[in-house]
Image (cartoon, rainbow, N blue to C red):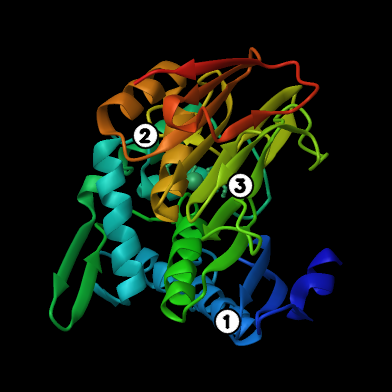
Amino acid sequence: MKRALFGGLALALLLTGCGTQSSEAQIFAMNTFMTLTVHSPHAREDVKAATALINQLDRELSVTRPESEVWALNHADGNPVEVSSDTAALLKAALELGEKTSGALDVTLYPVVKAWGFTTDEHQVPGEETLSALLEGVDYSAVSLIEGEDGAAVTLPQGIELDFGALAKGYAGEVCADLLRDSGVTSALLRLGGNIQTIGARPDGKPWMIGVQDPSRPDDPDAVLGSLAIVDQAAVTSGGYQRYFEQGGVRYWHIIDPSTGSPARSGLSSVTIVADSGTLCDGLSTALFVMGREKALDFWRQEGGFEAVLVEDSGEVWITAGLSEAFTPAGESTYTLHIAEA
Ligand code: ADP
Ligand code: MG
């Protein structure tokens, strides 16, 4: 029903001063509702181009569409498959992040994700033997990506399947921003579900204000624990509250710890990452959720290149030093804030 409402491309166009238009589209792609808002002299065309790009990426990268490149890879029986530059670029980023995060992000986790039913919504708790058998095949380092002058080829060993669910929306936001910047856009807000990508500042020159959802009140989008002032960057949140099912009074969510094959119970209820690259934000929001607060902050201190807001189940919130100015706490909040120093 909701899908039908948003399925079509709804375009709203407003004319503002100085030849600048504002155009907005609401689309359903990558299993998520998205809102693309662009302010530019050719906003309507810009929004259409960004929409077309997202739909193209959805067709290439979807793990459930039989016409996608990911589907072809997962059904290649160990044979090499030629892939588009987008699939190659995203896989490259995913493998590098797998390495950097010591496997906390592992795109070959797909058979495990499937066993929990997260891609089909036929949820179930797999048995321990099933999980340990499936985990044997989970290994991002076994994926071979060969890039040549004429394109790229990927080989997955028999039994290995991959899924870009942890990074695809971040990548989509990032390449849309590149496309829009190339066409001269200097102000845009792209909401791809919980993934935010901004270009420049708001038309009035002020930063975009991005709410950080209160993980204990997921059904109320206005329930934020604070907001982040963002300019020209991406902000991505991963949380156990975003997609889950309950069985026997236990909640099971869609972010899986590759070392156990079960939902990551690291003491974190959400992780928000802010950085220039949407792909990095999306990959790290998932990986740092798996790591938990201490390892996540160590990782931030060692690697740098991003900032984070970590929300713990206990109600403690850790804001990395680079966001201390950008973060404004909500008026009434039961959370205790800490600034993490480098
Ligand atoms: P969302 O899709 O809600 O934005 P994430 O970006 O955190 O959430 O990605 C979660 C998705 O990524 C899961 O639905 C699953 O397909 C996949 N996934 C879950 N855990 C991992 C992991 N540790 N490494 C790689 N992919 C994962
Ligand atoms: Mg992610």
Image coords of residue 207 (percent x, y): 59, 50
Q: Which residue is mark 2?
A: 104
Three-letter code for the amino acid on which mark 3 is drawn: Gly
Amino acid at the residue labelled 2: Ala
Camera-near label (3 vs 2) is 2
The answer to which of 68 and 187 lies nearer the viewer is: 187
Question: Which residue is more in the foreground, 248 or 331?
Answer: 331
| Residue under the image location 56 percent in, 58 percent down | 201
Q: Earlier in the sequence, mark 1 or mark 2?
A: 1
Q: Is mark 3 within 8 Å of ligand 1?
A: no
Question: Is disc 1 in contact with disc 3, using a CB cutoff of under 8 Å?
Answer: no
Label 2: how many Cα within 10 Å (few below 14, some 14–19, many 20+): many
Q: Which residue is the extreme one toward the front?
A: 18
Specify whether tag 2 is near ligand 1 (CB below 8 Å): yes
What residue is pinned by disc 3?
A: 117
Mark number displayed over residue 24 = none
Return the residue nearer the eye: 266 or 330.
330
What SS does tag 3 mark? loop
Image-quadrant location for residue 54: bottom right
Residue 125 location, x and y as percent? 61, 33
State the image coordinates of residue 164 (x, y, percent, origin top left).
44, 56
Relative to 52, does residue 265 appear above or below in the rendering? above
State the residue position of label 1. Answer: 46
Pair 1/2: label in front: 1
Question: Secondary structure under badge 1?
Answer: helix
Q: Which is more toward the observer, 125 or 318?
A: 318
